[in-house]
Each structure stands twice: as C-alpha cells, then as structure tokens.
Amino acid sequence: MALELHLPDLPEVPIGLGQVPAPAPRPPQPWHQRLRERVAIYLPLLLMGLLALASWWLVKSTPRVELPRAAEPPSSEPDYTMNRFVVERFDAQGRLTARIEGRQLRHYPDVDRIEVDDARVRVVGKGGRPTLAQARLAISNGDGSELQLLGDARIDGSDAQGRPVAFRGEFLHLYTRTERVKSHLPVLVSSGGSEFRAAGLDYDHLGGLLQLQGPIRALLQPQELQRRAPANAAASTPKDPR
C-alpha cells in the first residue's frame, strides 16, 4: 500500500546577496526621558544602599544590654596618699580617740592597710589614759585596732598603778582596743626607774601582766629610790635664768 504526503505551499522569500542594510537610526529622546531611564536602572541599587545604611544606624543606636561583669580585684597600688598630714578620730560622743601624724601616708585597698612614714601616734584608751607611739614606719589595719611599729619604735604609757611605762625596740605591735603590746624582737622596758632587756615581750595592760622572753637582763631600783627619783630629778633641774 503506498502512502502519499501532501506539503503545504510555502511562501516565496526573496533572497539577496550583499551587505545587510543598517537599521534606521532612532530619533533622539528628550533629556527628562533619558533621566527617568537612568533612574529606573539605578533605583534598586540606591534603595539597597539606603536600606543597608538604615540597618547600620539602627544597630549602632540600639542600646546594648549590659552583661554582669565580674568584680575587679582591688589594686595592690596605693589608691591615695597624704604628705605632712594630721588625722584625728573621734568616738560617737565627740571625744578624741586617736591622732596620727607623719611625713607620708599610703592606703592599700587590696588589704585595707595604711602605712605611715615617720609616724607619731597618740591613742586615748579607757578612762582617758593616753598612749604615745612613734617609729620610722607604722603599719595599721583599716579600723586602727592594730598598729605595727618598725624601726626605732617606742611606746610610752602608764601601768595599772599609773606609773610611767616605756617600751623600746626595732619592732613593737600595739593592740589599741585590748591595750596590749607584743614583740618577738629584743626590747627594752622601763618602769619606775627599773629597766628590763629581753628577747621579746607580751604586755597586757588590762590584766596587769608583763611577760618577758629570755634571756632577760634587769636593772632593778629599790622602791625607796623609786619614790625619791622624781623629787631628786626635779631638784637637780637648773632654774630658768629668766
């Protein structure tokens, strides 16, 4: 069996050889139309830039949440100093309890310690009894309850009977509240004309007890001479010619 295929008639297309004629030039567009076309092309980029700038401004201007920070440890350097100073302390009734003066004072916040060069201290104890202390260097804790004296240290006070008592040494530790004096270094104790040299001491004024650590050397004065010593000293003092 034979098949027949019928094709439609195709239109005739002219074919020419040679150069293709150039398209006709477009008429010039007005400047405002050209501007609109430029704006339409670059407008998306401009909007993206504006959005990025607005996002950056919002991030910079938004307040940040402060996270809890660990407390910084106190510095080991002095947080304040004073030169050629005088410091006085008073109790709730306005009575003078302590007076500290010296060449320079330094406060260390990490250990709450005060150091004083060429210190002179006056502490008023119970009953108004004064105690005088001085040294080339004095170290006190924050509340002033302990005072360490280093270098040519001396403490002048009185015993339970009101007689003068003096302590001398290179190191003396004064407890102002409990009225005690301690030292682990050689000391000289003078009381009523008698002298005691020892390798250390523990003096409790409230308990009326003096403990000396050996070896001990003592120069004791008889009670009769002790009573006459102030009168003899006064009699031997020359009178003021004025």
Image: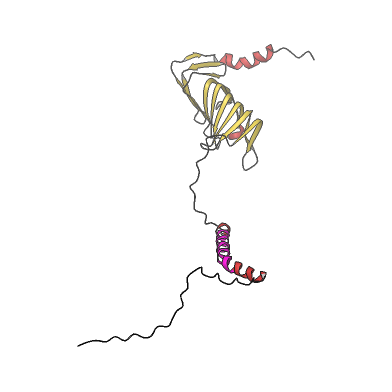
Image quadrant where one finds the C terminus: top right
Q: Residue drawn at (57%, 25%), measured in percent from left and top?
A: 137
Pinpoint residue 4: horizontal percent, then vertical percent. Answer: 27, 87
- Say which quarter of the image contains residue 164: top right
Secondary structure mostly seen in magenta is helix
Instruction: Give the residue furthest to the right.
Output: 242
**What range of the chain is rendered magenta?**
40-58
- In the picture, residue 128 is in which quadrant? top right
Q: Is residue 6 above or below residue 113?
A: below
In the figure, residue 58 lies in which quadrant? bottom right
Nearer to me, 45 or 105:
45
Q: Check the image and name the residue furthest to the left.
A: 1
Q: Residue at x 63, y 69 (%)?
A: 34
Q: Is residue 44 magenta?
A: yes
In this rendering, the answer to whether 92 lies above or below 45 is above
Residue at image location 46% in from the left, 15% down from the top: 216
